[in-house]
Image (cartoon, rainbow, N blue to C red):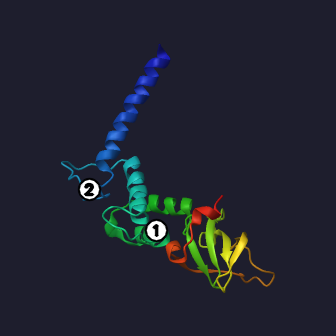
């Protein structure tokens, strides 16, 4: 009986939390946004987290109202650098640390003019801008098969990095499906 009571209580708490997140996830930390808050309060932690994830997903995905997507790295930079977005900056930083500056599946151009797909965020928090990538084409655009996995944070013997990301690229422009390289 006690177990059943605890289960029901957890279900009620979950339902309340879910309703709160549904209502608050478009509110900013200063309570602007929507719906308009009737009284002063704090936005819940879960709502702040969902707000960040929802905003990231909306900007990096095609939608009915917008066919152009924004590069994941640009979205993360905007979330971090634009205070008008009203996001909790501590949680944004944690989100970026989880995803990495270049999220998994991002197509990147290296300074060697090779194309690569980010396959993992670097586990070293000091090397967020140097993820683990799979190089899928050489500088002349020839496909490399199988893709060459490289940790961009590992320096050569002279202490210099062999490759550095110079920009992100639209995979559609190159006819690439990044997911094909993440298996």
Q: Position of residue 151 (x, y in %)?
A: 71, 70
Is disc 2 placed on a helix, strand or loop? loop
Name the residue tied to disc 2: 31
Cα distance in 3D space between marks 2 and 1: 22 Å
Q: Position of residue 172 (x, y in %)?
A: 50, 73
In the image: residue 95, left or right of residue 115? left
Give the residue drawn at x 46%, y 68%.
76
Quadrant of the rendered structure where residue 139 is?
bottom right
Of 39 and 124, which appears nearest the observer? Answer: 124
Residue 76 is marked as: 1
Of 157 and 116, which appears nearest the observer? Answer: 116
Is disc 1 placed on a helix, strand or loop? helix
Give the residue drawn at x 35%, y 69%.
83
Give the residue drawn at x 56%, y 65%.
100
Of 144 and 46, which appears nearest the observer? Answer: 144
Q: Position of residue 94 (x, y in %)?
A: 51, 59
Q: Does 142 appear above or below 44? A: below
Residue 16 visible in the shown view? yes
Quadrant of the rendered structure where residue 175 is?
bottom right
Residue furthest to the left in view is: 38
In the image: residue 80, left or right of residue 96? left
Q: Position of residue 54 (x, y in %)?
A: 39, 56
């Amino acid at each position: 009986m006690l177990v059943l009571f605890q289960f029901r209580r957890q279900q009620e708490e979950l339902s309340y939390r879910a309703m709160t997140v549904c209502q608050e996830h478009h509110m900013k930390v200063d309570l602007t946004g929507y719906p308009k808050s009737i009284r002063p309060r704090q936005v819940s932690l879960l709502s702040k987290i969902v707000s960040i994830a929802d905003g990231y997903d909306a900007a990096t995905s095609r939608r009915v109202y917008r066919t152009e997507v924004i590069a994941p790295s640009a979205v993360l930079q905007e979330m971090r650098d634009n205070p008008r977005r009203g996001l909790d900056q501590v949680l944004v930083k944690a989100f970026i640390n989880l995803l990495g500056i270049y999220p998994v599946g991002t197509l990147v151009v290296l300074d060697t003019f090779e194309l690569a797909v980010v396959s993992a965020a670097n586990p070293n928090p000091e090397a967020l801008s140097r993820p683990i990538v799979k190089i899928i084409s050489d500088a002349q655009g020839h496909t490399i098969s199988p893709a060459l996995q490289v940790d961009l944070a590992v320096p050569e013997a002279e202490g210099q990095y062999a490759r550095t990301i110079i920009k992100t690229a639209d995979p559609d422009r190159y006819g690439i499906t990044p997911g094909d390289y993440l298996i």
